[in-house]
Image: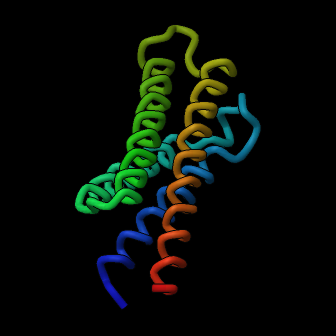
């Protein structure tokens, strides 16, 4: 067992599950989407991105691209949440929450692609 691959897989799966946990629920209901879960998803996605920098293979490049897309979407979601709570006089409206959750849904899709790539890479490794 390679500890580096265990840590890599752990962070990829944790990023996807945290993202899913934030995304699940009604789109415009702020009470079911926790800001700390979004923060944890952003941080874990950034850690997963850093772990992907060392892989110089083609599949490693796709891993990095999916992670960068997820980071961008989650940071945009956090920025919208920050704007809604700190700048906007209306607060977190259902429209703002729908934007936040939609952006996290895009990140979830990128994270799912990353998980599929991880599984494909793992299966192909055993067949060599």
Tell which of 7 and 55 is nearer to you. 55
Point out the residue furthest to the top here.
89
Q: Quadrant of residue 99?
A: top right
Q: Nearer the viewer, residue 125 or 100?
A: 125
Q: Residue at left 69%, top 21%?
A: 94
106 horizontally vs 72: left or right? right
Quadrant containing the C terminus in the rendered view: bottom left
Residue at point 30%, 77% (across, down)? 4
Answer above or below: position of 36 versus 121. Answer: above
* Quadrant location, the N terminus: bottom left
Q: Position of residue 20 (x, y in %)?
A: 62, 52
Q: Name the colour scheme.
A: rainbow
The image shows residue 116 at horizontal and vertical percentages of 57, 62
- Residue that sits furthest to the bottom in the current view: 1
Rendered view: 69 above or below 18: above
Q: Residue at x 42, y 51 (%)?
A: 62
Quick check: 7 left or right of 92? left
Q: Indicate whether 35 appears above or below 76.
A: below
Q: Which residue is the extreme one toward the left?
A: 54
The structure residue drawn at horizontal position 51% and vertical position 8%, both measured from the top left corner, is: 89
Name the side, left or right, on which 122 lies relative to 6: right
């Amino acid at each position: 067992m390679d500890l580096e691959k265990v840590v890599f897989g752990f962070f990829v799966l944790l990023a996807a599950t945290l993202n899913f946990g934030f995304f699940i629920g009604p789109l415009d209901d702020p009470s079911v989407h926790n800001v700390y879960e979004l923060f944890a998803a952003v941080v874990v996605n950034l850690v997963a991105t850093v772990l992907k920098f060392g892989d110089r293979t083609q599949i490693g490049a796709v891993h990095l691209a999916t992670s960068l897309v997820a980071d961008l979407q989650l940071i945009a979601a956090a920025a919208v949440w920050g704007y809604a709570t700190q700048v906007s006089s209306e607060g977190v409206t259902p429209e703002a929450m729908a934007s936040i959750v939609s952006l996290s849904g895009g990140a979830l899709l990128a994270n799912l692609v990353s998980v599929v790539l991880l599984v494909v890479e793992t299966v192909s490794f055993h067949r060599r």
